[in-house]
Image: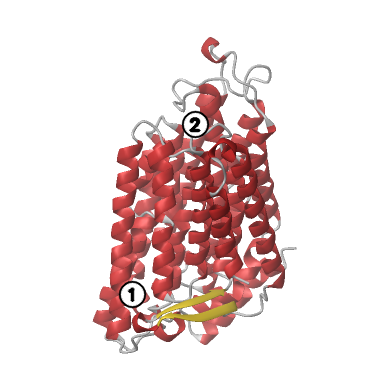
Amino acid sequence: MLSVLIWLPVIGALIISCLPQERAAVRGRQVALMFATIVLVWTGWLVLQFDASVAGFQFQESLPWIQQLGLRYQLGMDGLSLPLIVLNSLLVWLAIYSSDTNLNRPRLWYCLMLLLEAGVAGAFLAENLLLFFLFYEVELIPLYLMVAIWGGARRGYAATKFLIYTALSGILILAAFFGLALLSGTGSFDYTVLQNPALPIGTQLVLLITLMIGFGIKIPVVPLHTWLPDTHVEAPTPASVLLAGVLLKLGTYGILRFGLGLFPETWQIIAPGLAWLAVVNVLYGSFVAIAQTDMKKIVAYSSVGHMGYILLAAAAATPLSIAGAIAQMVSHGLISALLFFLVGVVYAKTGTRDVTVLRGLLNPERGLPLIGTLMIAGVMASAGIPGMVGFVAEYIVYRSSLPIFPVQTLLCMVGVGLTAVYFLNLVNRAFFGRLPDALANLPAIYWKDRIPSIVVVVLVIFLGLQPNWMTRWSELTSLSLGTLDDRAMIAASLALRPLRSAD
């Protein structure tokens, strides 16, 4: 059942690659949308079949592959991977739908979109560590080509930088996986076999830090973040949407699944340092975002800051904070995708993303009033306004982390105010004021430009008002990942109960 999420997009990509070039622009888009729709519907069916009362993996598949290396085709889905799989299926569909119908080499573009979906789904579903690494590396290739071929003026530099950083991330992760399998004496790469390895604390600490650096590059964690703004600025809009909405979550997923999941005892040693690193991410990302004038860079640095909230929740490592981290991953995925969709429309219609040039786009007659309204909604969600999904996720993170790391949590709360500063500055400059004559005759806005953003805004508001639809699937998985004793587990379960009854 899970293999459909991986191999159906691959089949779609193969079909698109066989289409005649002269018909690829239309037919390729239709085929890609058809396969993405089937995957999205199949994902919804899996959600309906998912048993939220089970903490472990469900829908498991296991087949022998290369036994000498310990590589098995081993898949499973639990409360940590399910929300991210749904996010991946949804955002890929929206990214394909919003793709430029006049782009060059459409056959290759839609193939890469579907292959990216397959690679990310495989990484979120893999139970075998080597299988995870293979899918983790596979998703690198499509995004690199998207930036290198369809990116902006400095696309070569940005794509190469992305490739180098992500390749280094993969090397560190693979080294840690091999070290764990060999030093534990099992020779296995099975996730369940390698949990709580019987290794000296010093050895575990080296392996855990290696993993954290590898996944920290992907998140990205300051100071390993410099590839992200460059890649976002040069990437086409659909690629930016998938990068911020889904691909960054591979890093946060990795530290929860393989860092906390495999080394729960050693995690307590690095947790204080990780909490301070979260503070650095939040404050650095926010202050640098304030200084930017490119709308894409503002949103990119906001991602650096908001990833800090997930690091803080992961450091606390309580069941409630793990639930908060998962909620923040979903929240950030939706909100960042919304903002990049809207920035892409503004750039396509005005030819610039510079907030010192743009003015008055909320003008109801000659501007982009609906796009401006949706942008304000996205900004409010990112700033954690109640009634939207950003507020729910950040509240759970703060509520759970404050007893464990009070100083670090209070400092991260400053990031909420700073988020309001740089996003209100963006909205005030670009959308209010008098529309300049140079922007008086903007191209028409079509529903193809509006629908992706409207869909995401509806989800942002709905999940903000009904958070149980987002948190219920991960409750028992959060309990199993949290590093607490039995009495604390019971207390955490009681703390999670209001989320279950939010309906």
**Where in the figure is residue 216, as x and y percent of width and height?**
35, 59
> Residue, x 61% and y 20% (percent of image)?
443
Q: Residues within 10 Å of mark 1 (few under 14, many from 20)?
A: many
* Total numbered labels: 2
Residue holding disc 2: 426
**Where in the figure is residue 256, as x and y percent of width and height?**
45, 69
Q: Quadrant of residue 218?
A: bottom left
User: Considering the image in quadrants, where does the N terminus appear?
Assistant: bottom right
Colour setup of the view: secondary structure
Mark 1: secondary structure: helix
Q: CA distance from mark 2 to mark 1?
A: 43 Å
Mark 2: secondary structure: helix
Is residue 84 depicted above or below 245 in this figure?
below
Instruction: Say if residue 286 shows up in the picture.
Output: no
User: Considering the image in quadrants, where does the C terminus appear?
Assistant: bottom right
Amino acid tagged 2? Leu
Q: Residues within 10 Å of mark 2 (few under 14, many from 20)?
A: many
Amino acid tagged 1? Phe
Side of 315 relative to 322 (left or right): left
Side of 429 relative to 449 (left or right): left
Residue holding disc 1: 177
* Label 2 or label 1, whichever comes before in sequence order: 1
Camera-nearest label, 2 or 1: 1
Of residues 418 and 430, the one nearer the viewer is 430
> Residue, x 47% and y 43% (percent of image)?
240
- The answer to the question of whether label 2 and label 1 lie on touching residues, with beta carbons closer than 8 A, is no
**Where in the figure is residue 135, as x and y percent of width and height?**
44, 64
Is residue 493 depicted above or below 421 in this figure?
below
> Residue, x 40% and y 66% (percent of image)?
134
Instruction: Say if residue 183 shows up in the picture.
Output: yes
